[in-house]
Amino acid sequence: MKILTNFMNAPDELEVSRHTIELLKAESWHEFKRQLRCVDMVVINCGDALLYRTARHFLINPWAKKPLIAVDLVLRRPDTVRHRVTAAVKRVLLGQVTHFIHYFKDWSGYERHFGVAQSRSSYVPFKVNNRHLRDIAGALTEEYVFTMGRSLRDYDTFIRAIGRLPYPAAIPQFSFDDFEGKGANFPWNAGNIPANLKVLPDAGGRHDLIRNLARAKVVVIPTHSASLCASGLSTYLDAMYLEKCVVISEGPGASDLLTNEAILVPPHNEGALAEAIQRAWEDDQLRRTTAAAGRAYAESLGVEADLLQRVFAQSLAAVGVR
Protein backbone atom coordinates (compact mmCIF):
# COMPACT_ATOMS: atom_id res chain seq x y z
CA MET A 1 0.00 0.00 0.00
CA LYS A 2 1.21 3.47 -0.90
CA ILE A 3 0.35 6.40 1.35
CA LEU A 4 0.96 10.06 0.56
CA THR A 5 1.75 12.07 3.68
CA ASN A 6 3.38 15.22 5.02
CA PHE A 7 4.94 13.37 7.98
CA MET A 8 8.34 14.37 6.66
CA ASN A 9 10.28 12.63 9.45
CA ALA A 10 8.67 9.29 8.74
CA PRO A 11 10.72 6.53 7.09
CA ASP A 12 10.12 5.66 3.44
CA GLU A 13 8.73 2.28 4.45
CA LEU A 14 6.89 1.23 7.58
CA GLU A 15 5.72 -2.10 8.97
CA VAL A 16 2.28 -1.51 10.49
CA SER A 17 -0.20 -4.13 11.68
CA ARG A 18 1.50 -6.85 9.63
CA HIS A 19 1.36 -4.65 6.53
CA THR A 20 4.23 -3.00 4.71
CA ILE A 21 3.33 0.53 3.65
CA GLU A 22 5.33 2.78 1.37
CA LEU A 23 5.27 6.44 2.37
CA LEU A 24 5.51 9.10 -0.30
CA LYS A 25 6.24 12.43 1.37
CA ALA A 26 5.51 15.98 0.29
CA GLU A 27 4.72 19.33 1.92
CA SER A 28 3.52 21.58 -0.89
CA TRP A 29 0.18 21.27 -2.64
CA HIS A 30 1.99 21.13 -6.01
CA GLU A 31 3.94 18.03 -4.92
CA PHE A 32 0.86 16.53 -3.29
CA LYS A 33 -1.29 16.92 -6.36
CA ARG A 34 1.40 15.45 -8.60
CA GLN A 35 1.52 12.24 -6.56
CA LEU A 36 -2.15 11.82 -5.70
CA ARG A 37 -2.97 9.57 -8.62
CA CYS A 38 -0.40 6.91 -7.71
CA VAL A 39 -1.26 6.36 -4.02
CA ASP A 40 -3.92 4.39 -2.16
CA MET A 41 -4.46 6.78 0.75
CA VAL A 42 -3.60 10.29 1.95
CA VAL A 43 -2.62 11.08 5.56
CA ILE A 44 -2.17 14.78 6.39
CA ASN A 45 -0.61 15.85 9.70
CA CYS A 46 -1.77 19.31 10.84
CA GLY A 47 -1.17 21.28 7.62
CA ASP A 48 -4.62 22.89 7.57
CA ALA A 49 -4.10 24.60 4.22
CA LEU A 50 -2.86 21.38 2.64
CA LEU A 51 -5.82 19.46 4.04
CA TYR A 52 -8.36 21.96 2.74
CA ARG A 53 -6.71 22.09 -0.70
CA THR A 54 -6.80 18.31 -0.91
CA ALA A 55 -10.41 18.17 0.27
CA ARG A 56 -11.39 20.83 -2.28
CA HIS A 57 -9.65 18.85 -5.03
CA PHE A 58 -11.64 15.73 -4.11
CA LEU A 59 -14.89 17.72 -3.91
CA ILE A 60 -14.41 19.14 -7.41
CA ASN A 61 -12.98 15.91 -8.84
CA PRO A 62 -14.89 13.07 -7.11
CA TRP A 63 -13.44 10.47 -9.52
CA ALA A 64 -9.97 11.27 -8.16
CA LYS A 65 -10.93 10.85 -4.50
CA LYS A 66 -8.79 8.69 -2.23
CA PRO A 67 -9.28 7.88 1.47
CA LEU A 68 -8.20 11.03 3.30
CA ILE A 69 -7.07 10.93 6.93
CA ALA A 70 -6.67 14.17 8.91
CA VAL A 71 -4.28 13.99 11.88
CA ASP A 72 -4.24 16.63 14.63
CA LEU A 73 -6.47 19.10 12.80
CA VAL A 74 -6.78 22.28 14.88
CA LEU A 75 -10.25 23.85 14.84
CA ARG A 76 -11.47 26.77 16.94
CA ARG A 77 -14.88 27.76 18.15
CA PRO A 78 -16.48 30.13 15.58
CA ASP A 79 -17.31 33.09 17.81
CA THR A 80 -17.83 35.85 15.23
CA VAL A 81 -19.95 36.19 12.09
CA ARG A 82 -16.85 35.89 9.89
CA HIS A 83 -15.69 32.78 11.75
CA ARG A 84 -19.15 31.21 11.45
CA VAL A 85 -19.11 31.75 7.69
CA THR A 86 -15.64 30.22 7.52
CA ALA A 87 -16.82 27.31 9.67
CA ALA A 88 -19.65 26.62 7.22
CA VAL A 89 -17.14 26.41 4.36
CA LYS A 90 -14.84 24.17 6.42
CA ARG A 91 -17.77 21.92 7.27
CA VAL A 92 -18.31 21.25 3.54
CA LEU A 93 -14.63 20.58 2.90
CA LEU A 94 -14.25 18.40 5.98
CA GLY A 95 -17.05 16.26 4.61
CA GLN A 96 -14.43 14.94 2.17
CA VAL A 97 -12.28 13.62 5.02
CA THR A 98 -12.63 9.88 5.61
CA HIS A 99 -11.40 9.89 9.19
CA PHE A 100 -9.97 12.22 11.83
CA ILE A 101 -7.22 11.17 14.24
CA HIS A 102 -7.02 13.34 17.35
CA TYR A 103 -4.62 13.61 20.27
CA PHE A 104 -7.58 14.21 22.61
CA LYS A 105 -10.85 12.40 23.35
CA ASP A 106 -13.50 15.09 23.73
CA TRP A 107 -14.64 15.63 20.12
CA SER A 108 -18.00 17.20 20.97
CA GLY A 109 -16.94 20.69 19.85
CA TYR A 110 -15.72 19.40 16.49
CA GLU A 111 -19.03 17.66 15.90
CA ARG A 112 -21.17 20.57 17.05
CA HIS A 113 -19.40 23.32 15.11
CA PHE A 114 -17.91 21.52 12.12
CA GLY A 115 -19.95 18.37 11.58
CA VAL A 116 -17.07 16.01 12.41
CA ALA A 117 -19.11 13.02 13.56
CA GLN A 118 -17.87 10.90 16.45
CA SER A 119 -17.98 7.90 14.11
CA ARG A 120 -15.33 9.54 11.93
CA SER A 121 -13.00 10.28 14.84
CA SER A 122 -10.51 8.29 16.88
CA TYR A 123 -7.93 9.00 19.56
CA VAL A 124 -4.25 8.13 19.60
CA PRO A 125 -1.87 9.26 22.36
CA PHE A 126 0.70 11.92 21.45
CA LYS A 127 4.34 11.83 22.63
CA VAL A 128 6.93 14.09 24.24
CA ASN A 129 8.50 16.32 21.59
CA ASN A 130 11.72 17.00 23.49
CA ARG A 131 12.67 13.71 25.13
CA HIS A 132 16.30 14.81 25.10
CA LEU A 133 15.58 17.82 27.30
CA ARG A 134 16.44 16.08 30.59
CA ASP A 135 19.94 15.56 29.20
CA ILE A 136 20.56 19.25 28.51
CA ALA A 137 18.37 20.96 31.10
CA GLY A 138 21.02 20.77 33.80
CA ALA A 139 20.02 20.77 37.44
CA LEU A 140 16.23 20.75 37.78
CA THR A 141 15.82 23.69 40.13
CA GLU A 142 12.56 25.07 41.51
CA GLU A 143 12.52 28.85 41.32
CA TYR A 144 9.15 30.08 40.06
CA VAL A 145 5.66 29.46 38.74
CA PHE A 146 6.01 29.33 34.98
CA THR A 147 3.67 29.58 32.00
CA MET A 148 4.27 29.81 28.27
CA GLY A 149 2.76 29.07 24.88
CA ARG A 150 0.97 30.81 22.03
CA SER A 151 -2.06 28.79 21.04
CA LEU A 152 -5.25 29.81 22.89
CA ARG A 153 -3.39 30.72 26.07
CA ASP A 154 -5.30 32.70 28.70
CA TYR A 155 -2.43 34.86 29.98
CA ASP A 156 -4.87 37.36 31.44
CA THR A 157 -6.29 34.95 34.03
CA PHE A 158 -2.80 33.65 34.84
CA ILE A 159 -1.40 37.11 35.47
CA ARG A 160 -4.38 38.12 37.59
CA ALA A 161 -4.02 34.94 39.65
CA ILE A 162 -0.29 35.50 40.14
CA GLY A 163 -1.02 39.07 41.27
CA ARG A 164 -2.96 37.60 44.21
CA LEU A 165 -0.04 35.40 45.32
CA PRO A 166 3.35 36.07 46.96
CA TYR A 167 5.33 33.54 44.92
CA PRO A 168 7.87 34.38 42.21
CA ALA A 169 6.52 33.75 38.73
CA ALA A 170 7.87 33.96 35.19
CA ILE A 171 6.79 34.21 31.58
CA PRO A 172 8.96 34.11 28.44
CA GLN A 173 9.80 37.29 26.58
CA PHE A 174 7.94 36.15 23.47
CA SER A 175 4.69 36.43 25.44
CA PHE A 176 4.66 40.08 24.41
CA ASP A 177 4.76 39.19 20.71
CA ASP A 178 1.81 39.54 18.39
CA PHE A 179 -0.40 36.48 18.81
CA GLU A 180 -2.56 37.25 15.78
CA GLY A 181 -4.19 34.02 14.63
CA LYS A 182 -3.14 32.09 17.74
CA GLY A 183 -6.06 33.05 19.96
CA ALA A 184 -3.91 33.93 22.98
CA ASN A 185 -5.15 36.57 25.40
CA PHE A 186 -2.46 39.02 26.55
CA PRO A 187 -3.83 42.49 27.41
CA TRP A 188 -0.68 43.39 29.37
CA ASN A 189 2.65 45.03 28.77
CA ALA A 190 6.00 44.84 30.54
CA GLY A 191 5.15 47.97 32.53
CA ASN A 192 1.91 46.85 34.18
CA ILE A 193 2.46 43.19 35.06
CA PRO A 194 2.66 42.28 38.79
CA ALA A 195 5.97 42.89 40.54
CA ASN A 196 6.44 39.18 41.29
CA LEU A 197 6.18 38.25 37.59
CA LYS A 198 9.56 38.12 35.88
CA VAL A 199 10.04 38.24 32.10
CA LEU A 200 12.61 35.66 31.01
CA PRO A 201 14.81 35.98 27.90
CA ASP A 202 13.25 33.71 25.30
CA ALA A 203 13.13 33.98 21.52
CA GLY A 204 10.79 31.00 21.21
CA GLY A 205 13.55 28.48 20.49
CA ARG A 206 14.01 24.98 21.88
CA HIS A 207 16.98 25.77 24.13
CA ASP A 208 15.21 28.75 25.69
CA LEU A 209 12.19 26.53 26.36
CA ILE A 210 14.28 23.87 28.07
CA ARG A 211 16.26 26.36 30.16
CA ASN A 212 13.21 28.22 31.41
CA LEU A 213 11.04 25.15 31.93
CA ALA A 214 13.77 23.36 33.87
CA ARG A 215 13.83 26.12 36.51
CA ALA A 216 10.09 25.96 37.24
CA LYS A 217 8.60 24.72 40.50
CA VAL A 218 5.05 24.73 39.11
CA VAL A 219 4.07 24.91 35.43
CA VAL A 220 0.70 26.45 34.55
CA ILE A 221 -1.08 25.92 31.21
CA PRO A 222 -4.07 28.31 31.22
CA THR A 223 -6.21 27.90 28.10
CA HIS A 224 -9.35 29.54 26.77
CA SER A 225 -12.71 27.84 27.08
CA ALA A 226 -12.98 28.47 23.32
CA SER A 227 -10.41 25.73 22.78
CA LEU A 228 -11.93 22.74 21.00
CA CYS A 229 -8.76 20.66 20.89
CA ALA A 230 -5.62 19.82 22.84
CA SER A 231 -4.14 23.29 23.31
CA GLY A 232 -0.98 23.11 25.39
CA LEU A 233 -0.57 19.35 25.01
CA SER A 234 3.04 19.48 23.82
CA THR A 235 3.99 21.98 26.54
CA TYR A 236 2.51 20.05 29.41
CA LEU A 237 4.08 16.79 28.21
CA ASP A 238 7.50 18.48 28.11
CA ALA A 239 6.91 19.77 31.65
CA MET A 240 5.78 16.37 32.87
CA TYR A 241 8.79 14.70 31.30
CA LEU A 242 10.96 17.08 33.34
CA GLU A 243 8.93 15.93 36.39
CA LYS A 244 7.28 19.29 36.96
CA CYS A 245 3.94 19.69 38.69
CA VAL A 246 1.45 20.90 36.06
CA VAL A 247 -1.66 23.01 36.68
CA ILE A 248 -3.90 23.15 33.59
CA SER A 249 -7.31 24.43 32.55
CA GLU A 250 -10.09 21.91 32.08
CA GLY A 251 -11.02 21.19 28.48
CA PRO A 252 -10.19 18.91 25.54
CA GLY A 253 -6.71 17.46 25.78
CA ALA A 254 -6.64 17.95 29.56
CA SER A 255 -9.66 16.81 31.57
CA ASP A 256 -10.46 14.11 29.00
CA LEU A 257 -6.95 12.61 29.27
CA LEU A 258 -5.57 13.42 32.72
CA THR A 259 -6.51 12.51 36.28
CA ASN A 260 -3.79 12.62 38.93
CA GLU A 261 -1.10 13.55 36.40
CA ALA A 262 -1.99 17.26 36.70
CA ILE A 263 -4.08 19.64 38.78
CA LEU A 264 -7.14 20.65 36.75
CA VAL A 265 -8.91 24.00 37.19
CA PRO A 266 -11.92 25.65 35.50
CA PRO A 267 -10.91 27.99 32.65
CA HIS A 268 -11.04 31.78 33.20
CA ASN A 269 -11.36 31.39 36.98
CA GLU A 270 -8.53 33.37 38.57
CA GLY A 271 -9.59 32.43 42.10
CA ALA A 272 -9.53 28.71 41.38
CA LEU A 273 -6.24 29.08 39.52
CA ALA A 274 -4.63 31.03 42.36
CA GLU A 275 -5.80 28.41 44.86
CA ALA A 276 -4.42 25.56 42.74
CA ILE A 277 -1.05 27.31 42.35
CA GLN A 278 -0.93 27.92 46.10
CA ARG A 279 -1.63 24.25 46.86
CA ALA A 280 0.99 23.08 44.38
CA TRP A 281 3.59 25.51 45.71
CA GLU A 282 3.08 24.90 49.42
CA ASP A 283 2.09 21.22 49.54
CA ASP A 284 5.34 19.37 48.81
CA GLN A 285 3.66 15.96 48.86
CA LEU A 286 0.96 17.01 46.39
CA ARG A 287 3.47 18.64 44.08
CA ARG A 288 5.84 15.68 44.05
CA THR A 289 3.11 13.08 43.70
CA THR A 290 1.52 14.96 40.81
CA ALA A 291 4.89 15.48 39.14
CA ALA A 292 5.79 11.80 39.48
CA ALA A 293 2.48 10.70 37.97
CA GLY A 294 2.95 13.18 35.13
CA ARG A 295 6.47 11.92 34.49
CA ALA A 296 5.24 8.30 34.32
CA TYR A 297 2.48 9.30 31.90
CA ALA A 298 4.81 11.25 29.61
CA GLU A 299 7.35 8.41 29.66
CA SER A 300 4.68 5.86 28.71
CA LEU A 301 3.88 7.62 25.44
CA GLY A 302 7.09 6.54 23.74
CA VAL A 303 8.97 8.28 20.96
CA GLU A 304 8.30 9.52 17.42
CA ALA A 305 8.47 5.98 16.01
CA ASP A 306 5.78 4.84 18.44
CA LEU A 307 3.53 7.75 17.47
CA LEU A 308 3.94 6.96 13.76
CA GLN A 309 2.98 3.35 14.42
CA ARG A 310 -0.16 4.47 16.25
CA VAL A 311 -1.15 7.01 13.60
CA PHE A 312 -0.69 4.77 10.59
CA ALA A 313 -2.21 1.72 12.30
CA GLN A 314 -5.30 3.79 13.03
CA SER A 315 -5.27 5.15 9.47
CA LEU A 316 -5.35 1.62 8.09
CA ALA A 317 -8.05 0.57 10.55
CA ALA A 318 -10.19 3.56 9.51
CA VAL A 319 -10.43 2.15 5.97
CA GLY A 320 -10.90 -1.43 7.10
CA VAL A 321 -7.32 -2.68 6.77
CA ARG A 322 -6.32 -4.65 9.88
Image (cartoon, rainbow, N blue to C red):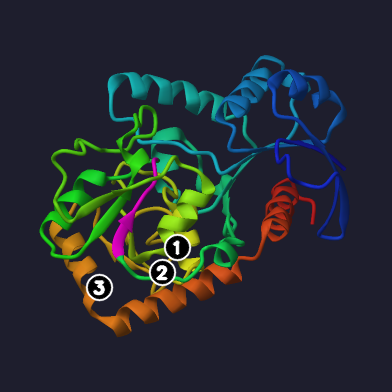
Q: Judging from the image, what secondary structure is the residue with disc 2 in?
A: loop
Q: CA distance from mark 3 to mark 1?
A: 16 Å
Quadrant for the N terminus in the image? top right
| Residue type beneath disc 3 | Trp
Quadrant for the C terminus in the image? bottom right
Please report contact status of discs 3 and 1: CB closer than 8 Å, yes or no.
no
Residue that numbered label 2 is attached to? 244
Check if residue 181 falls in the magenta segment: no
Residue that numbered label 1 is attached to? 239
Dot 2: within a 10 Å radius of its alpha carbon, few (fewer than 14), some, or many (20 or more) residues?
many
Q: Which label is found at residue 281?
A: 3
| Residue 254 falls left or right of residue 57 | left
| Vertical arrangement, residue 206 with respect to residue 250, above or below | above
Residue 197 appears at what percent x and percent y?
21, 53
Quadrant assignment, res 251: bottom left
Check if residue 147 falls in the magenta segment: yes
Residue 219 appears at what percent x and percent y?
35, 62
| Vertical arrangement, residue 293 with respect to residue 311, above or below | below
| Residue 280 falls left or right of residue 28 | left
**Number of marks in picture:** 3
Q: From which residue to which does the magenta span run? A: 144-150
Q: CA distance from mark 2 to mark 1?
A: 5 Å
